[in-house]
Amino acid sequence: MTHSLLTAHQVAKRLGVTVRTVQRLAASGALPVAHKLPGQTGAFLFSPADVDDALRAKHGTTSEGQQP
């Protein structure tokens, strides 16, 4: 099964943050980067599952949608 990867812009919309915040999260390791496009300024691409995990962490819920 293959998953589509998400751009920083798509991740920002899902998380309700700016693209720059997504870039900072990726740079700090708080949001895993699934793939980086070639070149010095190549875009980061993200796994939807990792983004969903970050969204749950932001809202303080478990994968079942409950408070820990």
Image (cartoon, rainbow, N blue to C red):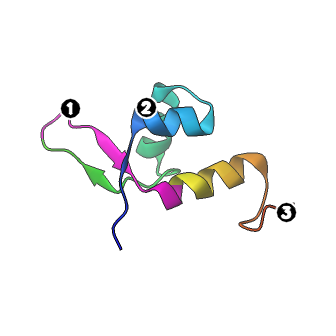
Q: Quadrant of residue 4?
A: bottom left
Q: Residues within 10 Å of mark 1 (few under 14, many from 20)?
A: few
Disc 1, SS: loop
Residue drawn 44% across the image and 44% down it = 26
N-terminal-most mark, 1 or 2: 2
Q: Which residue is mark 3?
A: 66
Q: CA distance from mark 2 to mark 3?
A: 27 Å
Give the structural element (helix, strand or loop) at label 2: helix
Look at label 3 and name its amino acid. Answer: Gln
* Rendered view: 45 above or below 32: above
Q: Mark on residue 56? A: none
Q: Quote the CA–CA distance across marks 1 and 2.
A: 15 Å
Q: Secondary structure at mark 3?
A: loop
Instruction: Check if mark 2's residue and mark 3's residue have beta carbons within 8 Å.
Output: no
| Outermost right residue | 67
Question: In front of the other: label 1 or label 2?
Answer: 2
